[in-house]
């Protein structure tokens, strides 16, 4: 079967379309005819050797996909052949068929298109786990999201709006402001051209941030650490800047705020039942029109390297989806 292959951790430019054997589901897995797969920043990091895990090479990238179940493992009772599903996995999505754990898959209603379904589990799962499970967000709190026009950032803006939060979106260029406003941001800050401290103080009437959802890291997170409200929650989500910051521990002490780690992939492995329940909740929100994954563009599988390079270059708003069937 056709698949995109990563033979070495040298980045998107060395990805190649090739032929591999069809995978077989383990006892707790399902086998899927893949219809669509999304391209994430994590995928780009993984093929570049910059993620915290390195699969044996060659491997098929792709952490999130959607399609139709064709077979199930001996222990799987929640899915059957013919079910429409979305799934997440560490690798395997950029292929005609993939396997995924049943606990990391969810059944789709007929009303949800495969392209949309391929672009919501990781983004909205991260946002939901961060805002609902980790931050315990309360209506009318101020949420500041960095990298707000990216896949995970935009999901946090959208879900924050749904939860009744006062969403402030941080972006790196003015051309992204319109999109984040359409998704629910009440205020937009371009932290490359504006003074972040002054703007946060202005939009929060001097109170500071209740919930900081940071995808960027580096100096942005260091600044956010000085702009938190009393009792706030500062959440490192990712480090797209490439720099992991250091925060003086007197800062959370002085305002009694918490620094709360968010790694939804590890949580889903450790607490599979709770993660499956979250996925069911997200599908209900999606089917009901309460959340709206944004698809930047749809490309054929053969253009996976081009799509991943666009993600690396920060020219993608929301997600690129690869159409496979």
Image (cartoon, grey):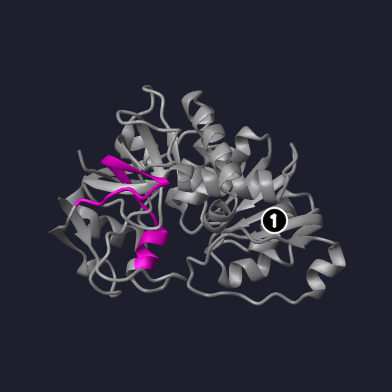
Q: Position of residue 4 (x, y in %)?
A: 21, 58
Q: Which residues are magenta?
A: 22-46
Q: Is residue 139 above or below residue 317?
A: above
Q: Position of residue 250 (x, y in %)?
A: 82, 74
Q: Residue at x 58, y 61 (%)?
A: 194
Instruction: State left or right for residue 305 relative to residue 149.
Output: left
Instruction: State left or right for residue 1 relative to residue 280.
Output: left
- Residue situated in front as seen by the camera: 283 or 56: 56
Picture quadrant where residue 312 is located: bottom left
**Element type at mark 1:** helix
- Residue situated in front as seen by the camera: 133 or 168: 133
Instruction: Return the residue at label 1.
Output: 200
Instruction: State left or right for residue 255 relative to residue 244.
Output: right
Q: Residue at x 19, y 54 (%)?
A: 3
Q: Position of residue 322 (x, y in %)?
A: 26, 46
- Is 98 covered by the magenta stretch? no
Q: Residue at x 80, y 60 (%)?
A: 257
- Residue situated in front as seen by the camera: 40 or 201: 40
Q: Is residue 44 visible?
A: yes
Instruction: State left or right for residue 19 relative to residue 170.
Output: left
Q: Position of residue 81 (x, y in %)?
A: 31, 31
Q: Residues within 10 Å of mark 1 (few under 14, many from 20)?
A: many
In the picture as drawn, the residue positioned furthest to the front comes out as 74
Q: Residue at x 27, y 64 (%)?
A: 59
- Is 23 covered by the magenta stretch? yes
Count of numbered circles on the image: 1
Q: Is residue 177 visible?
A: no
């Amino acid at each position: 079967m056709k698949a995109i292959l990563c033979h070495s951790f040298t980045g998107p430019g060395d990805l190649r379309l090739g032929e591999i054997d069809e995978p077989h589901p383990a006892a707790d897995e399902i086998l899927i005819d893949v219809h669509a797969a999304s391209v994430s920043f994590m995928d780009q990091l993984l093929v570049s050797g910059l993620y915290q895990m390195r699969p044996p090479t060659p491997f098929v990238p792709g952490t999130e996909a959607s399609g139709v179940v064709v077979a199930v493992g001996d222990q799987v009772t929640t899915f059957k052949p013919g079910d429409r599903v979305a799934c997440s996995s560490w690798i395997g999505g950029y292929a005609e068929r993939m396997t995924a754990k049943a606990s990391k898959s969810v059944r789709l209603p007929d009303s949800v298109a495969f392209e949309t379904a391929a672009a919501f589990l990781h983004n909205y799962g991260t946002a939901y786990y961060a805002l609902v499970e980790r931050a315990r967000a309360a209506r009318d709190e101020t949420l500041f999201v960095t990298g707000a026009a990216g896949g995970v950032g935009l999901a946090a803006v959208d879900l924050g709006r749904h939860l009744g939060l006062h969403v402030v979106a941080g972006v790196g260029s003015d051309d992204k402001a319109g999109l984040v406003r359409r998704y629910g941001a009440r205020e937009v800050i371009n932290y490359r051209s504006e003074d972040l401290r002054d703007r946060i103080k202005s939009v929060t009437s001097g109170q500071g941030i209740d919930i900081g959802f940071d995808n960027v890291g580096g100096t942005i997170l260091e600044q956010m650490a000085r702009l938190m409200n009393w009792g706030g929650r500062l959440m490192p989500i990712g480090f797209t800047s490439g720099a992991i910051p250091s925060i003086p521990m007197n800062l959370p002490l002085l305002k009694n705020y918490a620094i709360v780690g968010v790694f939804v992939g590890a949580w889903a492995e450790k607490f599979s039942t709770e993660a499956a329940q979250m996925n069911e909740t997200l599908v209900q929100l999606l089917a009901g029109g309460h959340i709206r994954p944004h698809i930047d563009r749809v490309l054929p599988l053969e253009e996976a390297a081009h799509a991943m390079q666009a993600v690396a270059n920060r020219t993608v708003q929301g997600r690129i989806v690869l159409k496979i069937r």
